[in-house]
Image: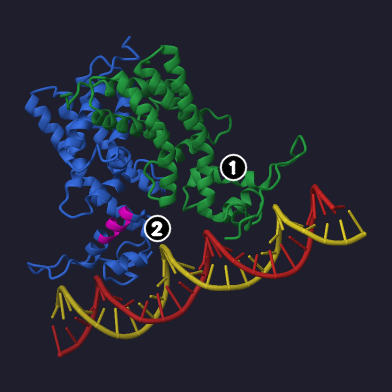
Chain colours: A green, B blue, C red, D yellow
Amino acid sequence: MNQPTAVPSSAPNGDEPSAATRDRLLDVAERLFAQRGIDATSLRAITTAAEANLASVNYHFGSKDALFLEVLARRIAPINAERLRLLSEAEKQAGGIPPLESILNAFFAPALSLYAQKDEDGKSIMSLMGRLYTEPRADELKKMFFSQLREVLQRFIPALKRALPELEQSEIIWRFFFVVGSMAHLMSAGDVLSFASNGLCTVEDNEKSLQHLIAFSAAGLRAPPTEPLI
Amino acid sequence: MNQPTAVPSSAPNGDEPSAATRDRLLDVAERLFAQRGIDATSLRAITTAAEANLASVNYHFGSKDALFLEVLARRIAPINAERLRLLSEAEKQAGGIPPLESILNAFFAPALSLYAQKDEDGKSIMSLMGRLYTEPRADELKKMFFSQLREVLQRFIPALKRALPELEQSEIIWRFFFVVGSMAHLMSAGDVLSFASNGLCTVEDNEKSLQHLIAFSAAGLRAPPTEPLI
DNA sequence: ATATATTTCAAACATACGTTTGAATGAGAT
DNA sequence: ATCTCATTCAAACGTATGTTTGAAATATAT
């Protein structure tokens, strides 16, 4: 309940000798949540790894749940912004209706780019994001997540509709639902792929993964309509 | 550690006045695990709902993890057996290579049939199964889950290969990976679909869901090869 | 009916968790 | 130098958890 009355000043000096406690907590929490899951990650583990005091999470964020919420919001917002930007760019470049593949690329690429992060944690963070679609968690999380996703859907569904005029709106939503599932699966279970294929398929090459995902999704979306337009 | 030295005898009298404690625990645990998640479900909640003593889980299963493992194994085994049966049946009926749609139906239908269970819990159990692909859990669970899945893959991948001779093995595996993702998404996040579509799309009609999933997946699998056969 | 093994039970154990507290520390401004 | 506020810190709180225990109850077999 005791919230700080003011935000800690963000290091006025040019180079910060060490990141502010708040940021260190966010970074460490993100990594641990992703690797071990949320319930399995204790505040003690987070604060120890972040070299901060146990009470610091409750001081800076109020609660563990609020910390988790902020860990996610920090990632989701830029991804969705980039999605919208890429879609607009594709529409401008096409001078009207962009090809399905460009629309899908705009949706996938920002999320998959997590994998290409320089540090080793990209994969686990992506895995955490992928799991978000299905994690049984507090209402507040679901609200935050889907309010941010809804904005994206409101731009992408009409774009898909223009690219697939022969499909009913409901059929487009159905298929885009499966597209999201394919992406989430790649994000959250990509490591399983190489395991289950005995190393034949690997998720190491991000560009190749994106190609496979786009090719599959585009073809799935282009399936002949099962609910023809009346 | 203290395991019972013998399995409790399964009610020798014709009609059981009440299910054996062990079975009641499995049923209740399944429902609660599915609804609230595994970590959020305490042994006290399970045993109270099952009208059993707190110690009964440790007596009958050894630990909470072992209980969870058995809850899953009890569901997964029959589903995978039914998958293999349906595939064999489709192959017999086709007198050779069955159409892609029949292969996919054999893979999807047994899992999606969970939804059609008479009791209200079908959905949440299906959701639990769908989450299995990505839950960050103990190694023993992953081992059990994938050892059972591997058996299925060893029959389905060759079947898909025969139905899609123009594709490399690795490309088939990639695409089937997305197929699994689409199915898992439908299983674990089906309720999100109607929420995100403002009720336009709903998962209530199991047969319709299956049709959409098959149409999308078949088309995705049939996408032109990105890695052409040499 | 007696002996034996299985199952239930209430109680306690040990531990881990998120959170709160109140004093100590630090930095900036007056 | 002093005041003021934000931050850190060690310690404790209260609670919930999975598990263990040893006796009581129940069923099974001889």
Q: Secondary structure at mark 1?
A: helix
Left or right of residue A51: residue D24: left
State how far apart marks 1 and 2 are (Cα): 25 Å
Query: In this picture, which residue range is highlighted in magenta?
Result: B28-35
- Name which residue lies at 49% across and 43% down: A34
Locate the C terminus of chain A and report the quarter of the image it occupies. Answer: top left
What residue is shown with label 1?
A27
Q: Position of residue A171 (x, y in %)?
A: 24, 29
Q: Position of residue B123 (x, y in %)?
A: 24, 48
Q: Secondary structure at mark 2?
A: loop
What residue is shown with label 2?
B40
From the viewer's perspective, is residue B211 above or below residue B42? above
Q: Is residue B30 magenta?
A: yes
Q: Are marks 1 and 2 in contact (CB under 8 Å)?
A: no
On what subunit does the disc labeled 2 rest?
B
Please name the amino acid that badge 1 sits on: Asp
Q: What type of secondary structure mainly makes up the magenta span?
A: helix
- Name which residue lies at 39% across and 45% down: B135
